Image (cartoon, rainbow, N blue to C red):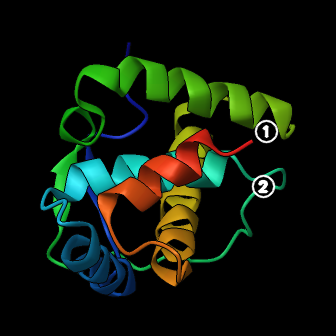
Amino acid sequence: MESPMERIKLSQTAKDQLSKLKRSTKIDQWNILCRWAFCRSLAEPTPPSPVPIPQDSNVEMTWRVFGGEMSDLLLLALKQRCHNDGYDTDKETLATQFRLHLHRGIGYLAGDQNIKKIEDLIELAIKD
């Protein structure tokens, strides 16, 4: 399945937030934390606000690194979410919505005072 973007570059704010999450959860790969963040945002009932997101950090990864074995499934989830929110599913819209969801999710995870270890992420995922 063709990815909406070849490379993903994070904002400096997102990098700082992920660094905090890396320390607390002991998950040391950016891509794994980014997957958690993306899914966290997708779980929200409202679409993310269309805000400009700078690409001003040195954290960069390919779509395949981001998604790993789940990259096609994550892309399908993104397409479904865009459809549900009334957006087109063209490559540009998917790339924009992906960046918005990723950065919103990173902000949500970093701002959650209850996330102090990896088990807290798991607890968040299995909550009703």
Which mark, residue 47?
2
Picture coordinates of residue 36, whole percent (x, y): 42, 50
Question: Along the horizontal axis of the image, is 101 left or right of 110?
Answer: right
Which mark, residue 87?
1
Outermost top residue: 1
Picture coordinates of residue 53, whole percent (x, y): 49, 76
Q: Earlier in the sequence, mark 1 or mark 2?
A: 2
Q: Nearer the viewer, residue 118 or 97?
A: 118
Q: Is residue 13 above or below residue 48?
A: below
Mark 2 belongs to which amino acid? Answer: Pro
Secondary structure of residue under mark 1:
loop
Q: CA distance from mark 1 to mark 2?
A: 10 Å
Q: Say whether residue 98 is visible.
A: no
Q: Is residue 30 above or below residue 75?
A: below
* Among the 4 quarters of the image, the one containing residue 100: bottom right
Q: Nearer the viewer, residue 88 or 81?
A: 81
Q: Is residue 22 above or below residue 111?
A: above
Q: Is residue 39 above or below residue 82?
A: below
- Which quadrant holds the C terminus? top right
Q: Are marks 1 and 2 in contact (CB under 8 Å)?
A: yes
* Among the 4 quarters of the image, the one containing residue 92: top right
Q: Nearer the viewer, residue 7 or 81?
A: 81
Q: Nearer the viewer, residue 96 or 37?
A: 37
Tell me what residue is drawn at x 46 percent, y 68 percent.
106
Question: Along the horizontal axis of the image, is 102 left or right of 101?
Answer: left
Picture coordinates of residue 43, whole percent (x, y): 69, 46
- Which quadrant holds the N terminus? top left
Instruction: Specify few, some or many for label 1: CA neighbours under 10 Å numbering under 14, 14-19, or 20 or more.
Output: some
Question: Along the horizontal axis of the image, is 93 left or right of 56?
Answer: right
Tell me what residue is drawn at x 27 percent, y 38 percent.
63
